[in-house]
Image: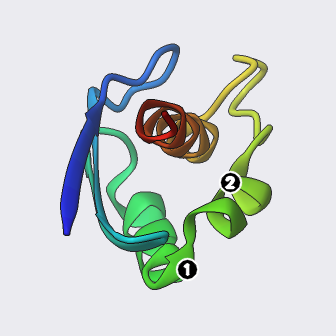
């Protein structure tokens, strides 16, 4: 099991911690942001393959910001995948 921390940009959340087992997102912790929405997202993505989470969340926009907490979760996974591919 691995942990990966990511500093989101352009959203209210200040940290995203991914907990990963092989290619599966086993848990996620998001600091700040909208608690109810993030709790719902957490419940929905737990146990999903990383690439499936990215395909579901990437590109979601919050109030014209060009990003959102779900989009930043996708970005955190992509950064993790880029860091682990050697």
- Can residue 3 be seen by looking at this rendering? yes
Graded by Cα atoms within 10 Å as few (under 14), some (14 to 19) or many (20 or more), the crowding at tag 2 reads many
**Residue drawn at (67%, 26%), measured in percent from left and top?**
67
Which quarter of the picture shows residue 15? Answer: top left
Which of disc 1 and disc 2 is earlier in sequence? Answer: 1
Residue 41 rendering spot, x and y as whole percentages: 50, 68
Residue 7 rendering spot, x and y as whole percentages: 32, 23
Is 46 placed left or right of 20 in the picture? right
| Label 2–label 1 contact, CB within 8 A | no
Q: Is residue 76 above or below residue 43?
A: above
Give the camera-side residue of 15 and 34. 15
Residue assigned mark 2: 54
**Residue drawn at (52%, 14%), measured in percent from left and top?**
10
Label 2 – label 1 distance at C-alpha: 10 Å
**Residue drawn at (78%, 57%), measured in percent from left and top?**
55
Is 77 placed left or right of 74 in the picture? left
Is 48 placed left or right of 51 in the picture? left
Q: Which secondary structure lies at badge 2?
A: helix
Residue 73 rendering spot, x and y as whole percentages: 51, 45
Residue assigned mark 1: 48
């Amino acid at each position: 099991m691995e942990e990966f921390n990511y500093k989101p940009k352009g959203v209210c959340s200040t940290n995203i911690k991914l907990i990963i087992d092989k290619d599966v997102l086993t848990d996620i912790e998001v600091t700040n942001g909208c608690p109810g929405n993030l709790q719902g997202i957490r419940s929905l993505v737990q146990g999903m393959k990383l690439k499936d989470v990215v395909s579901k969340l990437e590109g979601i926009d919050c109030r014209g910001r060009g990003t959102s907490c779900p989009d930043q979760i996708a970005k955190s996974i992509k950064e993790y995948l880029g860091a682990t591919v050697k």
